[in-house]
Image (tube, rainbow, N blue to C red):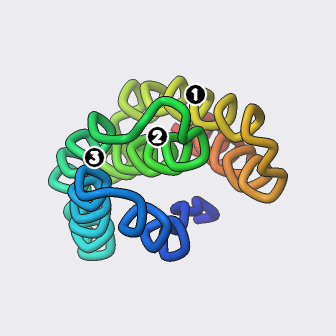
Amino acid sequence: MGLIISGFLGDLINVISNSAGKFSAARDISAAQGYFAGGNYLQALDEYKKALGKIQPSDKKLLAQVKNNMALCVFQTALDNKDVKGMKDSLPMFEESLSLYKEAGDTESIKQVERNISEVKRQVKGF
């Protein structure tokens, strides 16, 4: 499968250096990535949701990363359960992430999310 989780290492360093409130978001994101890596997508989704509420609206790139990864959690859970509706439900989240990356001018991440969207559509067609 060609889905790509957005990376956070450099962003976590920036977040941690900016404020204590952002440190809390970074901690949630780190926990989410651990759950995701372990295949616990629902727990990862919960952690990403907690982090989302702590990210400033002006931080488009970090918001886009979290939304991309939330969409991956929704998609992967649906794929594991052969839930086509759930797979389709991930698409608006991916689209929101794509829009934010476009606002941030992050060309490489735009390509990654576009690949994720294509993969979701390919999987949906296969069911």
Q: Position of residue 67 (x, y in %)?
A: 46, 40
Circle 2/circle 1 CB separation < 8 Å: yes
Q: In the structure shown, which secondary structural element does the residue marked by tag 1 occupy? A: helix
**In this figure, which residue is indicated by the disc labeled 3?**
51
**In this figure, which residue is indicated by the disc labeled 2?**
67
Examine the rendered structure and indicate whether residue 57 appears above or below residue 119.
Answer: above
Give neighbour class at mark 2: few <14, some 14-19, many 20+ (Cα, 10 Å): many
Examine the rendered structure and indicate whether residue 111 appears above or below residue 121.
Answer: below
Separation of marks 3 and 1 at Cα, in angstroms = 16 Å
- Between 17 and 24, the one lying in front of the other is 17
Give neighbour class at mark 3: few <14, some 14-19, many 20+ (Cα, 10 Å): many
Q: Which mark is residue 96?
A: 1
Separation of marks 2 and 1 at Cα, in angstroms = 7 Å
Residue at x 36% of width, y 31% of height: 86
Residue at x 66% of width, y 43% of height: 122
Q: Amino acid at mark 2?
A: Lys
Nearer-N-terminus badge (2/1)? 2
Residue at x 51% of width, y 45% of height: 68
Q: Amino acid at mark 3?
A: Ala
Examine the rendered structure and indicate whether residue 48 appears above or below residue 7.
Answer: above
Q: Nearer the viewer, mark 3 or mark 1?
A: 3
Residue at x 58% of width, y 65% of height: 1
- Between 1 and 38, the one lying in front of the other is 38
Q: Which mark is residue 3?
A: none
Q: Locate residue 121: give its quadrant.
A: top right
Q: Amino acid at mark 1?
A: Glu
